[in-house]
């Protein structure tokens, strides 16, 4: 090792930047590697999202259709087999309500819950929810339980 081959330890330096605008001798003076004129050569330039150099952008070329109903209600579905699983795991014994849905992450506290009819329910449960499908309600009552609409 001598003065001609000294170098920092591996990983000690991490500045790989080009030093722009530091005189002509650096080779990156003058226009500072930005070229001549145009928006990209100016300070403060930032491209708009979706800008295609003046060409009609994709989001304006593609036709729009359909509409979004502002009054739509989004229900969080919970199936009967999920309720049966809660019973099998010993989480629920007699009543299922919003606190059970929230604590088991089946819904959040602000969502509206709809009980759906997939699977079968063997346990006698008092199920509270905002909505029930006809098959789910029938299955709950057939098992000796009660369907309570919130």
Image: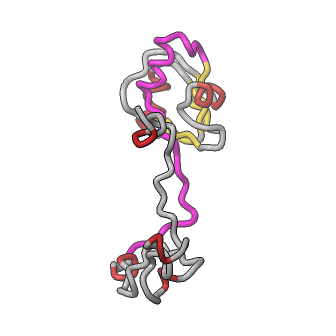
What stretch of residues is rendered in magenta?
A: 65-94
Q: Nearer the viewer, residue 4 or 33?
A: 4
Q: Is residue 97 left or right of residue 119?
A: right
Does the magenta-highlighted stretch encompass residue 85?
yes
From the image, which quarter does the N terminus lie in?
A: top left
Residue 35 occupies quadrant: bottom left
Q: Position of residue 74 (x, y in %)?
A: 53, 51
* Residue at image coords 55%, 54%: 73
Q: Position of residue 13 (x, y in %)?
A: 50, 43
Q: Nearer the viewer, residue 61 or 26?
A: 26
Q: Nearer the viewer, residue 100 or 144?
A: 100
Does the magenta-highlighted stretch encompass residue 118?
no
Q: Nearer the viewer, residue 36 or 127?
A: 36
Q: Is residue 51 above or below residue 145?
A: below
Q: Is residue 143 above or below residue 73?
A: above
Q: Is residue 53 left or right of residue 30?
A: left
Q: Position of residue 144 (x, y in %)?
A: 51, 18
Residue 6 occupies quadrant: top left
**Number of marks in the image?**
0
* Residue at image coords 43%, 16%: 122
Display coloring: secondary structure
* Residue at image coords 39%, 81%: 60
* Residue at image coords 43%, 74%: 50
Q: Is residue 54 left or right of residue 102?
A: left
Q: Position of residue 31 (x, y in %)?
A: 48, 81
Q: Is residue 32 above or below residue 14?
A: below
From the image, which quarter does the C terminus lie in?
A: top right
Q: Is residue 134 above or below residue 91?
A: below
């Amino acid at each position: 090792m001598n003065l001609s081959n000294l170098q920092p330890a591996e990983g000690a330096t991490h500045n790989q930047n080009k030093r722009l605008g530091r005189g002509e001798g650096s080779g990156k003076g003058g226009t500072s590697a930005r070229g001549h004129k145009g928006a990209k050569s100016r300070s403060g330039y930032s491209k708009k999202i979706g800008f295609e150099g003046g060409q009609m952008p994709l989001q304006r070329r593609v036709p729009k259709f359909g509409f979004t109903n502002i009054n739509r209600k989004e229900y969080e579905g919970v199936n009967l087999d999920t309720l049966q699983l809660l019973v099998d795991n010993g989480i629920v014994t007699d009543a299922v309500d919003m606190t059970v849905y929230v604590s088991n992450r089946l819904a959040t506290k602000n969502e509206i819950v709809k009980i759906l009819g997939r699977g079968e329910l063997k346990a006698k449960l008092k199920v509270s929810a905002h909505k029930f499908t006809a098959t789910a309600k029938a299955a709950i009552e057939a098992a000796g339980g009660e369907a309570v609409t919130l």
